Image (cartoon, rainbow, N blue to C red):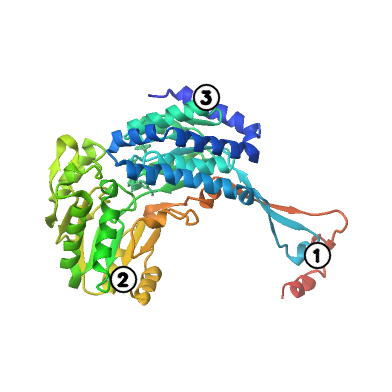
Amino acid sequence: MLIEKEITAQIVARQRRFFQTGKTKDIGFRVEQLKQLKQVIIDNQTEIAQAVQADLRKPKFETVAAEILLCIEEINYALKKLKSWTKPKKVATPLNLFPASAQIVSEPLGVVLIIGAWNYPFQLVIAPLIGAIAAGNCAILKPSEIAAHTSEVVAKLVGKYFESDFLAVVEGGKEVTQELLAEKFDHIFFTGGTEIGRIIMQAAAKNLTPVTLELGGKSPCIIEPDVDLELTARRITWGKFINAGQTCIAPDYLLVHRSIKEPLLAGIKQCIQEFYTDNPATSQDYARIISDRHFARLQKLLHSGGKVVVGGEINPSDRYIAPTVIDGVNWDDEIMQSEIFGPLLPVLDYDDLGDAIAQVNSRPKPLALYFFSKNKHNQQRILQETSSGGVCINETISHIIPPELPFGGVGDSGMGNYHGKATFDTFSHPKSIVKKPFWLDIKLRYPPYEGKLKFIDWLFK
Ligand code: NAD
């Protein structure tokens, strides 16, 4: 549905008026809305899963785990912690302010815009929304138009169970998003590609609106020789091919020590068979590519360099691409020029860990970095010598799970973060407050200053 500019402007104006009533600042109201959201998700989980299935043929297990449960857990966590997050935090005051007290109060920002991507189409708008509500804001959601079924369900459920003065969904693509971006928001939370992230930031700059950019990138997976090969293969296969590789933190490529490349690739091949059978096209547990455009993009990458050693089969009518491993790739190949975002796993090798680190560091900072090794010294080396949004040691993807861990990118992979308290903080302003009583007023700071500098010198030494 294409929302007319006037209508977009009206929704924003109505939300702004609602925010100014102060209703969303009430903690009871926030708790009520979070509980309502939880109930709506629980009651409609079948419809949500069906919509995600229609968009991506995502297995129900993956939808329940990565879209529905993740949101429920975020709500439970916010409900449990809201009282402590919203409590003013007293801080110490320096002697030269005596007598005074100081505190930090988390203040809601106002009306916020949340723009989602299509790969986890429900979670990517609802998880930020949870923090926006917890922090006391009004919000407009713009789910991805590419996951059209999920966008429709989100719009239907939010429209049915929430006042649009408080929460509203605007559906549509680029044009609609650009109309929204012309409005003044108090924060824009964007999930999507790095190039569109630049457009969002430019639009936000016109209104001096702060942004959170949850972007993508090429997340490396480095494997040393001293690993448990079977487990390493299993964890990589899971992280790469879940949602058919359409995961922002999927391992984009392998950088594997030359001495174990052959057995590791054999292990990955075996895991693909175990997970998805000899013919993954028939597996209920393997998703499809979201659109013809992305299918064509991935098809072009498939034979753009290196040699397919596992998979490679495609079926355009079903938008099916088999879990595929491509060996003998080098950095000049097209597949290494941008984020793959699909079930193609290129493999590069190295002889020396320092060289692997240098290769990663010569490229934009990735959203995630995966390192497999039992060696604690080398684990520490990776943590100290590389920069990425997040890291898993001997694991993939899972740093997204603990609500205590802020999730976000760095450099080209994004700015700002969310999940748990980080989402609440993203949609709050930490207001600094100093209170002074009237019973004492030390005159040292007031002019005339003559003779006072010596005392200040003494005070600060
Ligand atoms: P995208 O950038 O194409 O689209 C994201 C959103 O931006 C959509 O809602 C879309 O309607 C809107 N949009 C697209 N073009 C626009 C334009 N010119 N002006 C204004 N708005 C526009 O991203 P996508 O294809 O939906 O998702 C894939 C990307 O998202 C990948 O790079 C992936 O890594 C990234 N991603 C990141 C995270 C994260 O948490 N960091 C999570 C999921 C996906």
Question: Which residue does the image show at 38% across and 31% down from the upper left?
Answer: 47
The residue to which callout 2 is attached is 373
Say above or below: 391 vs 375. above
Measured as percent of width and height from the top left, residue 215 is found at 37, 49
Query: Is residue 156 positioned above or below 31 on the image?
Result: above
Q: Position of residue 238 (x, y in %)?
A: 28, 54
Q: Secondary structure at mark 2?
A: loop
Q: Residue at x 48, y 33 (%)?
A: 40
Name the quadrant of the N terminus. Answer: top left
Q: Residues within 10 Å of mark 1 (few under 14, many from 20)?
A: few
Question: How would you rate the neighbour count of disc 2 (Cα within 10 Å): few for under 14, some for 14-19, many for 20 or more?
Answer: some
Instruction: Tell me which image quadrant ligand 1 sits in.
Output: top left
Residue type highlighted by circle 2: Ser
Disc 3 residue type (three-letter): Gln
Residue 449 marker: 1
* Upstream in sequence: badge 3 or badge 2: 3
- For the residues carrying marks 3 and 1, which lies nearer the camera in this image? 3
Q: Are marks 3 and 1 in contact (CB under 8 Å)?
A: no
Q: Is residue 332 above or below residue 288?
A: below
Residue that numbered label 3 is attached to: 10
Q: Is residue 297 left or right of residue 60?
A: left
Q: Nearer the viewer, mark 3 or mark 2?
A: 2
Horizontal and vertical percent for residue 42? 46, 37
Which of 59 and 460 lies nearest the eye of the viewer?
A: 59
Q: Which one is closest to the eye, mark 2 or mark 1?
A: 2
Callout 1 secondary element: loop
Q: Separation of disc 3 and disc 2 at Cα?
A: 55 Å
**Residue furthest out toward the right:** 439
Q: Nearer the viewer, residue 339 or 267?
A: 267
